[in-house]
Image (spheres, helix red, strand yellow):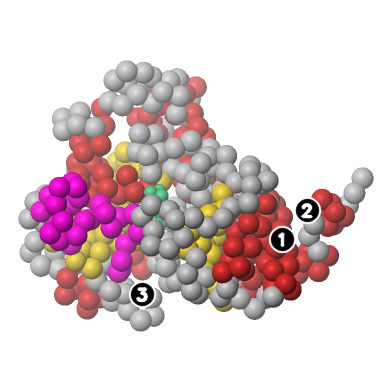
Amino acid sequence: MNTLNEMLIKDFHISPETVKLVEEAEAEVKAEFDAIDAMAMYNQAKVLKAYADNQIGEQHFVPTTGYGYNDMGRDAIERVYAQAFGCEDALVRHTIISGTHALSTALFGVLRPGDTLVSAVGRPYDTLNEVIGSEGKTGDGSLADFGVSYREAQMSADGGADFDNIRACIDDTVKAVLIQRSKGYLWRKTLTVAQINEIIDFIHGIREDIICIVDNCYGEFTEAEEPHGDLIVGSLIKNPGGGIAPTGGYIAGKAKYVELASYRLTSVGIGKEAGASLENNRPILQGFFMAPHIVAQALKSARLCASVFHKLGFEVCPLPHEENADIITSIKFGAPELVIAFCQGIQKGAPVDSFVEPQPWEMPGYADPVIMAAGAFVQGASIELSADAPIKPPYIAYVQGALTYESAKVGIMVAITKVLEKKLEK
Ligand SMILES: *Cc1c(COP(=O)(O)O)cnc(C)c1O
């Protein structure tokens, strides 16, 4: 039998130096790992209690068809999500195709012609640009096309919320404020739940009825509580699907706003009452049960990644010992061939499509070519180990996920090997 090191070196072509370096980097973030485990334990207990309180049983796994009236599993899932997230109600559906769709549904659900939407922390996630639309452009059905105006409060220089800027954006026409929790694909820190709640309290201090919508993508279960948004919104192929949900999204929060969003998703008057779950209740329930643990796997992988690339002399965000409130690590490679080598290495270390070598390509909706490494069981699932990078200076790769820490560790070793090979060639 080969030892682990022999296997890593012989079967994965990882250099002994890289194995050693990763072991050292891992030892340096031991305290962070302990904190992540403690958080997973807390969130697991919270989720388990929600399953017990809602008496989840075999009957909730039974598929429904057609209209999906009296779909016990679907309704139980929505109660479980609401309880675990500390919300009045939730809409959790496999028919919400992505995070963007969930956010779009929430925004169109609550906004009306003449209203204004404000983004409290700068430019929102890329895919929301077209949902919001631009002034003067008509006919595409965007918010702008329906007469909803949009304003943006820039963040402060230190990457936090700028309360003066937010204040300046609020007038009588503002119906809703969007707050993005994760850094997404920007070089900024992710907002903590405490920071988001502070923004929400500030906005409600100006006017109580402004609807605070949190883009919660990548944040779920990284802290002990979810933000106190009037609505919190996310994707099931990220954190809360636990790597098991095959597709879907959620919108949770105040019951009256969840209902408005459900009217937009299905139909006014029908809302949450219909929608066949088909075979999806079991994986959505199992995935949410797994999610606290799987998020911990992803958080540890993120820490290891930050620790080892920091050791190698690359700029990383967040730093290995800095507070981390989502599952993404950004690494500045400074050269196109290095960022490409890194993404190709991550792909090589994946369980699916490890034999494929990703290349940069012109993706619809993006200004620069993008390279994406994703060897996932669920297409595009970024709770699984994945990396993407727009090919433009300063050549940043965004890494996230891993269903298991152990597989991420191997993947990161392979990626380092690839990057160091490229560096030597230069
Ligand atoms: C992933 C993500 C979204 C939604 O993206 P989809 O690919 O449509 O699921 C929105 N906001 C943030 C911050 C995200 O990370």
Image spot of residue 100 (x, y percent): 34, 49
> As drawn, which residue projects farthest toward the bottom?
157
Q: Give above or below for 16 relative to 84.
A: below
- Callout 3, which amino acid? Gly
Magenta-highlighted residues? 121-150
The residue under label 2 is 12
Q: Residues within 10 Å of mark 2 (few under 14, many from 20)?
A: some
Mark 2 or 3, which is nearer the eye? 2
Mark with earlier residue (2, 3)? 2
- Asked whether the residues under the numbered discs 2 and 1 touch, taking CB atoms below 8 Å apart as contact, a structural biologist would say yes
Residue at the location (20% across, 36% down)?
Answer: 263
The answer to whether 14 appears left or right of 344 in the picture is: right
| Contact? badges 1 and 3 (CB < 8 Å) | no
Foreground residue, 90 or 98? 98
Residue topped by disc 3: 160
**Residue drawn 35% across the image and 59% down it:** 125
Residue on which disc 1 sits: 413
Give me the residue at 18% from left, 46% from top.
141
The three-letter amino acid code for the residue at tag 1 is Met
Examine the rendered structure and indicate whether residue 37 appears above or below residue 256: below
